[in-house]
Image (cartoon, grey):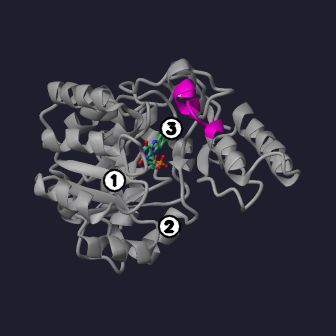
């Protein structure tokens, strides 16, 4: 555990004179493709975080040279419309919207994005179908998809996506099985046709520099922005993340392979322990033929419903879901987005200089 529990602990290490012309040039060259694709000053995406990534955080990230992404999948279509309008009211810089294909209101939310000519749509929840892809691209928007393996990255390329995010299991939120460092080695050397952004477990700029050197176009970070001053998250949610060390961000338990529920990385708390008990009760009922497999799976899936919002908005750190990546160890206080991005870029620059 870290020791300083205040909301504004250690100050960022920025403006420490670590830049040099050579470092600036190297960083500029390494990020050129990503910056061009995003239309930003920095090749850093602020990954969508359900209930956290609203117009205030997203506009702050974009105004400070990063690329903010609205968490559209957690919003009703009407709210998404309002959030896009509000974001545009606060920034004239590019930002994206994250949607999830499996979501019941995906089509309606996508229609809003296309009517609004949102420049980049970040599509999660599987490979979007050809109709969806062509609708987005015909409207003039770019499609960014998540590639959890090289095989899927190649399929996504064939289907015509404009960029990829490879997000490893160190990330906060719903995760796949493979570590970011392994995915980067598996995918970056083989995918050159589109920009690839790396996400999951990135807490410092040196890590960004390392992935850039491996061929990434840029990186996506979530957890580091969750505790920003501009984040709507409850003080108790922020405090829990500021207190936590990397090892506290654990994967939700899975008691039986038959229940194929997507795992979530979050801070260990009462809800995490309860989730184990609920699964074992449902499993026992299923084995005793008291409930069907579908009922058991639905029971397990519904357990987390509403819990992230409960933690983020209400500050219920025991019964809510404290989604956070292992990068949580790098969250040491409630900083402004400007300070967070400033430190990350400074660290990346100094890693480039010293290489
Ligand atoms: C609280 C929280 C909520 C998240 N919600 C979403 C989401 O709605 N959609 C999505 O694609 N990714 C979501 N993510 C993943 C982030 O966009 C990002 O890829 C991830 O946080 C990167 O790893 P890091 O947390 O180690 O930086 C979420 C992450 C966190 C921490």
Which residue shows up at 13% across the image and 43% down it? 117
- Give the main secondary structure of the magenta stretch: helix
> Marks 2/3: CA distance?
20 Å
> Marks 3/1: CA distance?
27 Å
Q: Is residue 261 left or right of residue 173?
A: right
On the question of residue 257 being in view, the answer is: yes
Which residue shows up at 55% across the image and 58% down it? 169
In what quadrant does ligand 1 lie?
Answer: top left
Image location of residue 25, percent across then percent down: 18, 61
Q: Which mark is residue 123?
A: 1
* Circle 1: element type: strand
Which residue shows up at 45% across the image and 27% down it? 334
Q: Nearer the viewer, mark 3 or mark 1?
A: 1
Which residue shows up at 21% across the image and 24% down it? 86
Q: Quadrant of the N terminus?
A: top right
Residue at the disc numbered 2 = 181
For the magenta stretch, what is the residue range? 302-311
Instruction: Tell whether circle 2 marks a residue whose Cβ is less than 8 angstroms from ligand 1.
Output: no
Image location of residue 18, percent across then percent down: 31, 50
Q: Residue furthest right?
A: 288
Q: Is label 3 in contact with label 1 (beta carbons under 8 Å)?
A: no
Pick the front one: 222 or 353: 222
Q: Is residue 310 magenta?
A: yes
Q: Is residue 80 left or right of residue 139?
A: right
Residue at the disc numbered 3 = 331
> Marks 2/1: CA distance?
22 Å
Image location of residue 95, percent across then percent down: 22, 42
Q: Earlier in the sequence, mark 3 or mark 1?
A: 1
């Amino acid at each position: 555990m870290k020791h300083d529990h205040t909301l504004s602990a250690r100050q960022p290490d920025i403006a420490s004179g670590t830049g040099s012309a050579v470092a600036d040039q190297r960083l500029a060259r390494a990020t050129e493709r990503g910056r061009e694709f995003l239309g930003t000053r920095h090749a850093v995406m602020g990954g969508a975080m359900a209930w956290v990534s609203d117009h205030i955080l997203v506009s702050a990230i974009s105004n400070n040279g990063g690329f903010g992404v609205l968490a559209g999948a957690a919003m009703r279509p009407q709210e998404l419309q309002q959030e896009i309008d509000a974001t545009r009211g606060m920034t004239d810089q590019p930002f994206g919207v994250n949607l999830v294909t499996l979501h019941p209101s995906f089509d309606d939310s996508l229609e809003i994005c296309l009517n609004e000519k949102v420049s980049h749509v970040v599509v999660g929840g599987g490979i979007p179908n050809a109709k969806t892809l062509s609708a987005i691209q015909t409207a003039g928007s770019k499609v960014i998809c998540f590639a959890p393996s090289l095989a899927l990255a190649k399929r996504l390329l064939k289907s015509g996506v404009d960029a990829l995010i490879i997000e490893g299991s160190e990330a906060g939120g719903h995760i796949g099985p493979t570590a970011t460092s392994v995915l980067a080695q598996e995918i970056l050397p083989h995918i050159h046709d589109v920009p690839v952004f790396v996400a999951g477990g990135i807490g410092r700029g040196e890590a960004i520099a390392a992935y850039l050197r491996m061929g990434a176009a840029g990186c996506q970070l979530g957890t580091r922005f969750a505790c920003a001053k501009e984040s709507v998250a409850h003080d108790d949610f922020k405090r829990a993340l500021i207190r936590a060390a990397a090892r506290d961000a654990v994967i939700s338990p899975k008691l039986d392979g038959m229940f194929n529920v997507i795992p979530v990385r979050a801070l260990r708390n009462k809800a995490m322990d309860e989730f184990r008990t609920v699964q074992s009760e449902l499993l026992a009922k299923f084995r005793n033929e008291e409930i069907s497999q579908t009922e058991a799976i639905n029971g397990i899936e519904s357990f987390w419903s509403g819990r992230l919002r409960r933690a983020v908005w209400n500050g219920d750190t025991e019964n809510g879901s404290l989604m956070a990546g292992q990068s949580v160890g790098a969250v040491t206080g409630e900083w402004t987005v400007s300070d967070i991005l400033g430190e990350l870029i400074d660290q990346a620059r100094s890693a480039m200089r010293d290489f």
